[in-house]
Image (cartoon, coloured by chain):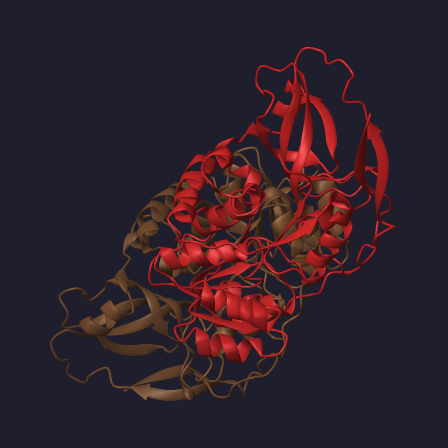
Chain colours: A brown, B red
Amino acid sequence: MVANTQVIFSKVPTTYPVVGEHITVKKSEFDLDAPLADGEFVLKTLVLSVDPYMRGRMRDASTKSYSPPFALNEPMTGHTVKEVVKSKSSNFKEGDFVYGMGTFEEYFKTNDHVAKLYGLVVRNDPKTNGIPISNYVGILGMPGMTAYVGLYKIGEIKAGETIYISAASGAVGQVAGQIAKAQGLRVVGSAGSDEKVAHLKAIGFDGAFNYKTEDTATKLAELCPKGIDVYFENVGGKMLEVVLTQLNKFGRIIACGMISQYNLSEGEKVGGLMQIIAKSIKFQGFIVSDFPEAEPEFLKVVTEMILNKKIQYQESHAEGIEKTPEALLDVLKGKNFGKQVVDVAKP
Amino acid sequence: MVANTQVIFSKVPTTYPVVGEHITVKKSEFDLDAPLADGEFVLKTLVLSVDPYMRGRMRDASTKSYSPPFALNEPMTGHTVKEVVKSKSSNFKEGDFVYGMGTFEEYFKTNDHVAKLYGLVVRNDPKTNGIPISNYVGILGMPGMTAYVGLYKIGEIKAGETIYISAASGAVGQVAGQIAKAQGLRVVGSAGSDEKVAHLKAIGFDGAFNYKTEDTATKLAELCPKGIDVYFENVGGKMLEVVLTQLNKFGRIIACGMISQYNLSEGEKVGGLMQIIAKSIKFQGFIVSDFPEAEPEFLKVVTEMILNKKIQYQESHAEGIEKTPEALLDVLKGKNFGKQVVDVAKP
């Protein structure tokens, strides 16, 4: 038997979840010596990803939404990189790194059938290419691919245009900004601290501002003198209302997330939607998992950008699986700086 | 000299325009005998179109929007069919019917250059095909083409889907509904009177309801048992908020107009925009004039539908140009039944 710490979804929150009430850490055990059936294998979690969208999964199971609700009193799930530590599967061999939707616990036994269902894939590149494993749940994982798909499939970005990115220092925003910049756009971002704003400028944003201390409308007008062609929307609410007034004709809103809304018991209402008609705006939501065909190109392009030092990625690391609840709360409250990951174990 | 009654934009309204204050009828004269320069021609208005979007043009000239503001103390303009009554143009000959943006007055002298600028075109079909001239500012004019472009270029409609159309008995809605039905969709519409609802059912809508006397959410759930795939949005405000909750994944909102908002001093705010992300919804505004390449196909398809009696078009006729202000007010208040036109003169 080995210790198997788990992160449990223990109660449906109405506003911000509370650590120890809605999310709890449970000490349990895992039998590493139990025999495996054919096709079964055991995974050890190396790194896990906490992301804003997870708040939407902390709901009553009767409410439908794009991502399935967490099961009450079960481990939460999210994007992880795990290592195969024992295997009777021919697809997942001992020592393989595995990326995909995984349970938030130290050990997990699964099988080929479940792995296929959840889209688990072997991702052994970080064993040799020098890229940190944590990057594979961030810039090279779901958040990075969300940025890529959003820009190209939804935003239809073109060189010479201006893009504005809210929550720009976040897991998705910083990738979106740097890819857009490499594509020849003028890139403007906002974030919630001066440290984050300085980081945005350091990684090549043409303009950045602190939305908590500066007036969004004024700063956007100043930093986007030709108006905004594409808005990478991570925030929602009042921010969206202001941006609508400064979008250009044929503007696109890449509706990626609305973090300002996730912890409100009732969502904020937004005015000025007539702008969508007046300026022929396309406001489109998407879920990255609907674009699996984009993954090979995304991985190739962004891996090369990393190896050629054409892109940087800021991460916040929490150490130890028991820090997961606080790490998620930091993300929901904007206290993290860059992509928040939890380092669970070394390979 | 002949009498030339004009419809003048005389003051910027803040809510509903008032006849005699914001829109006034002016008696003036026109010199039919004045000699013409080369390229000049004189048009006599046969029929004119009053449409909801015109409210947006009754604004202060300093406010930008998709359609140019009306000039103060000048005749309003809109879609008209006029007849060439005198000409020194080789493009517009005496007796030709001309369709396009025209002044709201009985007579108007123009020239080839201006005609090109405003996209005036000769439309002599109704002289021989038996289709009423008024149809050429309605089902075969801007509103009909708006329905066509909205459905195919924005809505990407597919057989088997469900479409919901608000303001469904209006100039655009009734065309959209019948084309969608012919395309194999389930078509549901709402309108503001029992007479209009009965008409929708008579022209083939699968379901229709009176949004003033019935609960929109309840009726939509009942009439769209498989949810809504496409929403043809003519209304905005609370209607939009309700529809967002019943749209299916990958739903499309054809953002055509928001008549509930045009006469409010401040637009209503709309909640539930998180649905756009949760359900990968595309909410897209458009202006039909950005799709000129669609016109030949539109005219061909819809003309054939009319001649083969595959489509019906309800019109309200006001008789005489001096009735124009009231006719426009009727449209803005939903008192008209079907496409509102003003018959100005016979050819």
Can residue A317 be seen in the rendering of this structure?
no
- Say above or below: B156 vs B213: above
Of A159 and B140, nearer the camera is: B140
- Image location of residue A322, percent across then percent down: 47, 79
Q: Quadrant of the C terminus of chain B?
A: top right
- Say above or below: A334 vs B43: below
* Residue situated furthest top in the rendering: B38
Can residue A23 be seen in the rendering of this structure?
yes
* Residue situated furthest left in the rendering: A38
Q: Quadrant of the N terminus of chain B?
A: top right
Count of residue discs: 0
- Image location of residue A331, percent across then percent down: 56, 68
- Image location of residue A32, percent across then percent down: 23, 82
Of B334 and A162, nearer the camera is: B334
- Image location of residue A40, percent across then percent down: 17, 75
- Say above or below: A194 vs A331: above
Could you say which quadrant of the image residue B36 lies in? top right
Of A216 and B251, nearer the camera is: B251
Name the residue rendered at 71%, 58% in the picture. B330
- Say above or below: A322 vs B319: below
Name the residue rendered at 83%, 53% in the picture. B19
